[in-house]
Image (cartoon, rainbow, N blue to C red):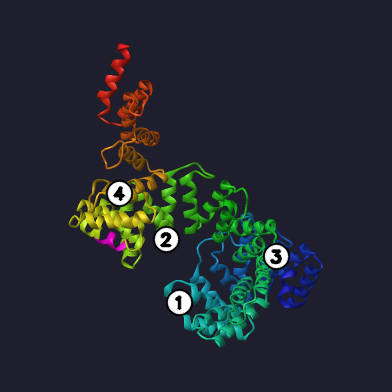
Amino acid sequence: MAVFDRVLWLVRPTPLLRRATRLNQQGRFNEAFTLLARGARAGRAEAEHRIAMAYFNGEGAPQSQAEGVRWLGRAAEHGWVDAQAQLAALYVHGIREPSVADPSDGAPGALFAADSRGAPDYASALEWARRAAAQGSAKGRAMVGYVLTYGPNAMRDLEQAHRCYELSAAAGCAEGHLGYALSLARSAADEPARREVAAQLLNAASAGLPTAIYLLAVMTEQGVGSRPDSKTAVELYRSAAEKGHRSAQTRWGMALIEGLAVQQDVVSGESWLRRAALAGDGDAALFLGRFYSGSGRSPPNHSEAARWFQTAAEAGHAAAARALGSLYLVGAGVAQDDEAAFGWLRFAAAAGDAHSRVDLANMVLEGAGDADDSARVAEWFREAAASGDLTAAFNLGLCLAKGIGCERDDEQAARWLRRAANGVVEAQFMYGRMLAEGRGLSPDPEAARDWFRRAAEAGLADAQVALAEMMAIGRGGPQEPAAARHWFEKAAANDHSGAMFALGALHSGGHGLVADHATAQQWFRAAAERGHAQAQLMLGRYLALGAAGQRNPGEALEWLERAASQGVAEAQPELANLQAVALGN
């Protein structure tokens, strides 16, 4: 019977193929497969191709990519043009024939060989695409164009690819229309050219190609080649999403969550975003992270946000890496981990994320990272500062002043801080300090006082204290105790413990103000409670002596002990005296 079947397939293949088609249409896949298998074993190319499709689709046989590719290769070798074009596409996607026994020998391992996917094989793809194109296949021409466009640099030929796409599109091939549209888009400088791109995309989209539908949606949304139409664009995104296009699933999910040109449906929108994110779309994972971190939920779910930020970050998304690093910094949704935070910020910064570079730089300026990180940060600041970024100029000045990532150079530090002082309050304060100390330039107390004033008026507490100190002692200008008290009080209102201590000292007398020991003690206490060591010493003294009207040796002992524990040498003898008095009593 097997010999008869082979002879029958050799002499009367067309009726047998028609019968196999009818059996498939009737859902009798097993019978159709058996019939086609006889033709495939007889070496009929079309039967081999149909067997390949049966394996791909699991119709009449267990679904098997490996067997599908194997039979497709046999059909291609026997000249079946559709198989040649399909085989070229599979090679582009990294799917190739498994190296197991030939299927015709009945080896049991053939049917169950593992499906394989690896790196694209553009050379094999181009060979099979050209064979198909030589037989007039429009899909073959489109595949040739694709390889010449996106293959290795040595294989690329955009002019020849354009001609292949054009011929394929003229023959009505959907892939040809898509490739031709993308090729035209590279030089579409005017409106007629953009309309032609849109027309080619429309032809490809009408054939159901998901990528074409998605790109047409983007053009429709942006009004390229037509008037902007958000509603139509969203419908196109939906159509491409339902066909499995990841980027379209992301845009459709975002539209549903935000209610953009469609009725809002947060649950469905989240589901679409999850589908895209799990398929590897970084934008979808980033949007989900932001959604869970608070932009779309109340209260936020930082644990879920961290999961999606990590998915996006691992896919190479810099903004997600920065967001994940921020969560690690504060321990939101993940365990607090400065090292992990630094690692993700380093990744995002290296990818060019400007905000991450700022965050990373701040950590480096506080001592995080290694020498390479410091050098990298200093170089980023130098590049940005040279282009006119005043914040970068300030940070570069700090690096030069402290020798972070570069040789310490006070003169250069002063130069960059002076430039940044035109717009950065902190730079005004730092430049004032360099003028006051004579670092990198000649001392100029008067100019320093002026820069401190500018920063103080902008609300910088450290500058308010520096200005008040100069006013209190008359440096860089006249002595102004009342004005000094005003600026100290401003800084104290911002919880500056140094300003509180200074107010205590001012009210102690001898600084141009009438002594008020009760007020002085109040300020010393406020600063001492915030950990200011000198204020703890002074509060201990006041309480020991009863300077504000009432002695309290027990509490005085406590404050002097705190000051001594912070290394204030003056506290030790006074502490010993109090302890001796206590023992004597």
Q: Are marks 3 and 4 in contact (CB under 8 Å)?
A: no
Q: Is residue 417 magenta?
A: yes
The amino acid on which the numbered mark 4 sits, given as a three-letter code, is: Ala
Instruction: Give the number of the mark in front: 1 or 3.
Output: 1
Would residue 54 appear left or right of 349 to someone viewing this image? right
As measured in the structure, the alpha-carbon distance from the residue carrying label 2 to the one carrying label 3 is 52 Å
Label 4: element kind: helix
Coordinates of residue 33 in the picture (x, y in percent): 74, 65
**Which circle's residue, 2 or 1, is located before the other in the chain?**
1
Q: Are marks 4 and 1 in contact (CB under 8 Å)?
A: no
The amino acid on which the numbered mark 2 sits, given as a three-letter code, is: Ala
Crowd band around label 2 with a 10 angstrom C-alpha radius: few (<14), some (14–19), many (20+): some
**Which circle's residue, 3 or 4, is located before the other in the chain?**
3
Q: Is residue 331 magenta?
A: no
**Which circle's residue, 2 or 4, is located before the other in the chain?**
2
List the residue tagged with mark 2. 354
List the residue tagged with mark 3. 54
Residue at horizontal 68%, vertical 65%?
A: 242
List the residue tagged with mark 4. 466
